[in-house]
Image: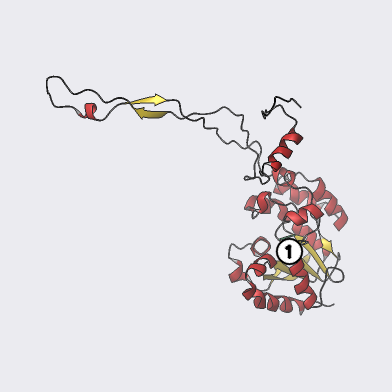
Amino acid sequence: MMNRGNEITSDMDPAFLLAWHVEMGADEAIGFDPVDRFTAPSAPEIRMPAAPRPAAADGAPRTVADIVAPTVPVAGPRVIEARPVQSVIGAGPAEAVRVAASCNNLEELRAAIEAFDGGTLKRGAKCTVFADGVPGAPLMVVGEAPGADEDREGRPFVGASGQFLDRMLAAAGLSRQSNVYISNVVPWRPLGNRTPDPAVIAMCLPFLMRHIELAKPQALLLVGKVPTGALFGSDDGITRLRGKMRDITAGGLTLPAMPTYHPAFLLRQPAQKGQAWRDLLTIRERLTL
Ligand code: URA
């Protein structure tokens, strides 16, 4: 690392620069794609009014050109064009379909997802969050994507919303220790905890479908709009979709799927807990425990 007093320079050790940014409070990425800030600047011309022309000495009427002062270019701020260095998607959905189909059990699928080129999404996450609970359990819960807590621990739903989910499941006689298996549509934490975009979901969906097929649950509980939209192929909001169970087909497996509210939403909107509770009891009736 080069040390030039307090100056931060681009030839410094990247690990040092990262630590410095975190110390300065810049610990959240604001875009999915890294941006090459060193690409050639394009400075738009900024024009300032020039000095007005003096009035004509002979008292002749001034023309529009006399009144509307001409402008002169001035040096403007440098505008750096934000150019993504690489796309979000690494190997892409077609490769995900091929890789997922080649997995014959859950451990192979986990290893395949861990080895998969998930592009900038995967590179932005600390780890691949595959699943938790009992493989082969009668109920499989599908969430959206890991958050910061899950990314740190490598297990889905371990933060505040996960703890609430566990309490709801326990009240219905269900738990990830005995009869529930839990995963997400997206196995990597999206930068800034943002909602996964359609391209990301399209890349991850083949893995989820194969995951369901290999885990062989009797029924699915889809928590929130993202898993419901992905598995039902719907753009409708969760308020419209929740409580309306449908059969879905994952490979050779057809099973009922119940959409309900995401536990994080229920923590913010406790008045909706009753509806989510009804959804849970409805899908529970479809289980042979
Ligand atoms: N929210 C989700 O949808 N999944 C998790 O694993 C954690 C929070």
| SS of the residue under disc 1 | helix
Is the residue 106 above or below the residue 218 in the image?
Answer: above
Q: Which image quarter: residue 286?
A: bottom right
Q: Which image quarter: residue 282?
A: bottom right
Q: Residue furthest top?
A: 57
Q: Which image quarter: residue 30?
A: top right
Position of residue 252 measured from the top left corner of the image (x, y, whole percent): 78, 64
Position of residue 6 measured from the top left corner of the image (x, y, whole percent): 68, 29
Is the residue 258 above or below the residue 120 in the image?
Answer: below
**Number of other residues with Cα within 10 Å of mark 1, as a class: few under 14, some 14 to 19, many 20 or more:** few
Q: How is the image coloured?
A: secondary structure
Query: Quarter for ligand 1?
Result: bottom right
Relative to the observer, which residue lies in front, 1 or 258?
A: 1
In this rendering, position of residue 73 left or right of residue 237: left
Is the residue 130 above or below the residue 283 in the image?
Answer: above
Q: Quadrant of the C terminus?
A: bottom right
The structure residue drawn at horizontal position 52% and vertical position 32%, both measured from the top left corner, is 79
- Residue type at numbered disc 1: Ala
Q: Quadrant of the N terminus?
A: top right
Q: Residue furthest front?
A: 5
Position of residue 238 measured from the top left corner of the image (x, y, whole percent): 61, 67
Total tally of numbered discs in the picture: 1
Can residue 153 be spotted in the picture? yes
Can residue 251 be spotted in the picture? no
Relative to the observer, which residue lies in front, 44 or 22?
A: 22
Is the residue 79 above or below the residue 196 in the image?
Answer: above
The structure residue drawn at horizontal position 84% and vertical position 71%, both measured from the top left corner, is 179
Relative to the observer, which residue lies in front, 28 or 285?
A: 28
Position of residue 279 measured from the top left corner of the image (x, y, whole percent): 69, 76
The structure residue drawn at horizontal position 83% and vertical position 68%, both measured from the top left corner, is 176
In this rendering, position of residue 178 left or right of residue 142: right
* Residue that label 1 marks: 160
